[in-house]
Image: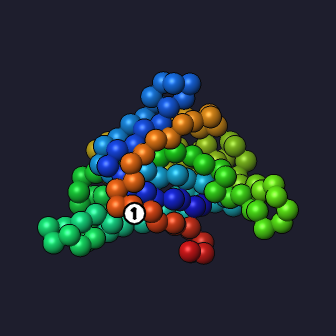
Amino acid sequence: MRAIIQRVSRAKVTVGGETIGEIGKGILVLLGVAENDSEKEAVYLLEKTLNLRIFEDADDKMNLSLLDTKGELLVVSQFTLYGDARKGRRPSFVRAAAPEEAKRLYEFFVGEARKQIGKVETGRFQAMMDVELVNDGPVTILLDSEKLF
């Protein structure tokens, strides 16, 4: 499982011009699910995401997590995180999970997040979405359950 974590002052996702998820200060997660992922990888990435110390404390040091700041979370599925463009010009997505399994693990991730965070918003699985964000910092962190980066 892979995630792009972006610290945001605000973010929203729209489908067909309709806003379906919107947050203020917090984290936007673009989440990709691999073919062999399970709940174990989802729990690992969620815990890592919620506890990343990427928010400033009173001394302007990145010492606080999303849990510490009571920030908000927007989770958007993005299978293209498993795009492999090492050969040719068209990415291969063979490592991405099948849609049914990806949706199940995406929903599991979101459900577990809702147990810990006051406001969790989402995109719409398999929809063409417009994602708008104001990256605060900018702060962008890449996470991978296989710890490749």
Residue nearer the viewer, 41 or 84: 84
Which quadrant is the N terminus positioned in? bottom right
* Residue at 42% over, 45% down: 133
Q: Position of residue 148 (x, y in %)?
A: 60, 75
Q: Position of residue 70 (x, y in %)?
A: 24, 52
Q: What is the count of numbered marks?
A: 1
* Quarter of the view holding residue 130: top right
Horizontal placement of 5 versus 35: left or right? left
Query: Can you say whether 93 is above or below 76 in the image?
Result: below
**Residue type for callout 1:** Val
* Residue at 32% over, 68% down: 53
Q: How busy is the neighbourhood of tag 1: few (under 14 within 10 Å), some, or many (20 plus)? A: few
Whether residue 94 is visible here, answered yes or no, is no
Q: Residue extending furthest right?
A: 88
Q: Position of residue 98 (x, y in %)?
A: 73, 47
Residue nearer the viewer, 137 or 32: 137
* Residue at 71% over, 58% down: 83
Find disc 1 in the rendering and name its residue: 139
Horizontal placement of 23 versus 129: left or right? left
Horizontal placement of 70 versus 59: left or right? right
Query: Can you say whether 99 is above or below 35 in the image?
Result: above
Query: Can you say whether 63 is above or below 93 in the image?
Result: below
Residue nearer the viewer, 21 or 147: 21
Which quadrant is the C terminus positioned in? bottom right
Horizontal placement of 134 versus 25: left or right? right
* Residue at 46% over, 41% down: 132
Whether residue 140 is visible here, answered yes or no, is yes
Q: Position of residue 134 (x, y in %)?
A: 38, 48
Report the coloring of the rendering: rainbow
Q: Under tag 1, what secondary structure? A: strand
Residue nearer the viewer, 79 or 103: 79
